[in-house]
Amino acid sequence: MVEVDLNHMAGRVLIDHAREAAANAHAPYSKFAVGAALLMADGSIVTGTNFENASYGLSLCAETVALASANVQGKLREVVAIGIIGGVMDGRGGITGHDPIRPCGRCRQILNEAASLAGRDLPVHCGSADGEVVEHHMLSALLPYAFGPGDLGIG
Ligand SMILES: [Zn+2]
């Protein structure tokens, strides 16, 4: 039980970092800002925001940006948890909304790359913009029977 409580506490901290990151989202088209924060094995936190593009189809999700940033730091195998938050931009650097944001299908697959390489399942903490709702999932539950590096002999 203690382990679960600590996990949930870490989730709240990650969501706070994700909220700070969301303030820098480049989301002029959807006006829906998302922030993601990765907890690394060394205790550091790596963040990302959604990064939209005028072509729409080339837009990147916050989770993907955070993972790419972790990779730049040589830490792709050190991801131990992720927190995500998102909501409608209020025009003052904040976000609004009551529903927790969960990773899209593509991001679940990309998260699975890091989790598989690290040899661990990932807690995925999903917060609502208003701070009232936090969901705690495991990546293996969000993406069961995943295809991953191990299927190609990498791991
Ligand atoms: Zn995504």
Image (tube, rainbow, N blue to C red):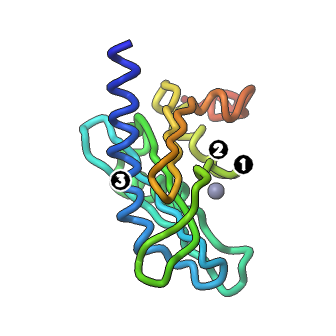
Q: Quadrant of the N terminus?
A: top left
Name which quarter of the figure residue 54 lies in.
bottom right
Packing grade of label 3 (10 A; few <14, some 14-19, many >=20) is many
Which is more N-terminal, label 3 or label 2? 3
Side of 146 where 86 appears, left or right: left
Task: Answer whether labels 2 and 3 touch (C-beta < 8 Å).
Answer: no
Q: Is residue 28 above or below residue 133?
A: below
Side of 59 where 64 appears, left or right: left
Q: Is mark 3 within 8 Å of ligand 1?
A: no
Packing grade of label 1 (10 A; few <14, some 14-19, many >=20) is few
Label 3 belongs to which residue?
16
Q: Is mark 1 within 8 Å of ligand 1?
A: yes
Q: Quadrant of the C terminus?
A: top right
Q: Is residue 100 above or below residue 24?
A: above
Q: Position of residue 6 (x, y in %)?
A: 32, 26
Q: CA distance from mark 3 to mark 1?
A: 23 Å
Packing grade of label 2 (10 A; few <14, some 14-19, many >=20) is some
Q: Secondary structure at mark 2?
A: helix
Q: Secondary structure at mark 1?
A: helix
Q: Tag 1: residue type?
A: Gly
Task: Answer whether labels 2 and 1 touch (C-beta < 8 Å).
Answer: yes
Q: Position of residue 56 (x, y in %)?
A: 72, 79
Q: Residue at x 47, y 61 (%)?
A: 35
Task: Answer whether labels 3 and 1 touch (C-beta < 8 Å).
Answer: no
Q: Is mark 2 within 8 Å of ligand 1?
A: yes
Q: Position of residue 30 (x, y in %)?
A: 66, 77
Q: Tag 3: residue type?
A: Asp
Name which quarter of the figure residue 152 lies in.
top right
Front disc: 2 or 3: 3
Label 1 belongs to which residue?
105
Label 2 belongs to which residue?
108
Q: Tag 2: residue type?
A: Arg
